[in-house]
Image (cartoon, rainbow, N blue to C red):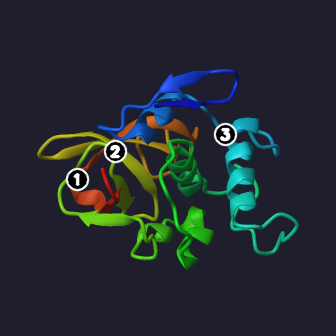
Amino acid sequence: FYRFFGEGKWFKINKSIAPWMEIAKMYIGTYEDKSSASNPVIQGWIDRHNQDFNLDGKEKQKPISSDNEPWCGIFVYNMLVLSGVKIERGKSWEYPSLASFYNTNWKNSVKINKPQYGAIAKMKWSHVTFIYDFDDTFIWVLGGNQAENGAAVRDGVTVNIAKYKISQIKEMRMPEGY
């Protein structure tokens, strides 16, 4: 089927692969705003999340309000939602910047033991991202709020593909049906 993707673009989703990855790849190179303002694209993802969880006007309850805060979970959430993945609200979904929302509170996912294209990797340092590729030693991950050099430090934070040792993965999950 086809799905509308903003800016007047339509694209075909191949349901046999992880459709959220096709959308995520379109955002490679999206950067945080270096000023006190947010990048409008990232801010749109943050706003969508806050609207989905009825957090508009509830500033103290919002887990994140700008791209000056960790937004890796916001990126993952939005790529899944934009691709049509069903997400039932569990208590941890309200805190996407904390990575913990990819635990058993996500009702529509299954824990996997081996890397798989499109799987959500929860890293050991409270970062969530998508598995893009892997071999016996390394994974390449596609995610938001990732440093340009693959380090776990906030310098030049962007949507990119970074390389890490597989041993840095704490847990992997896949949406049901994929």
Dot 3 amino acid type: Glu
**Residue 49 in the image: x percent, y percent?**
67, 57
Residue at (58, 38) in percent of width and height: 156
Asked if residue 146 can be seen in this view, the reply is no
Circle 3 SS class: loop
Q: Which residue is mark 2?
A: 118
Residue at (42, 46) in percent of width and height: 151
Select label 2 or label 1 by which is in front.
2
Dot 1 amino acid type: Ile
Is 30 on the left or on the right of 16, as rendered?
right
Q: Which residue is mark 1?
A: 166
**Residue 110 in the image: x percent, y percent?**
31, 65
Q: Which mark is residue 32?
A: 3
Gap in Å between the C-alphas at discs 2 and 3? 23 Å
Between 165 and 66, the residue placed more toward the observer is: 66
Dot 2 amino acid type: Gly
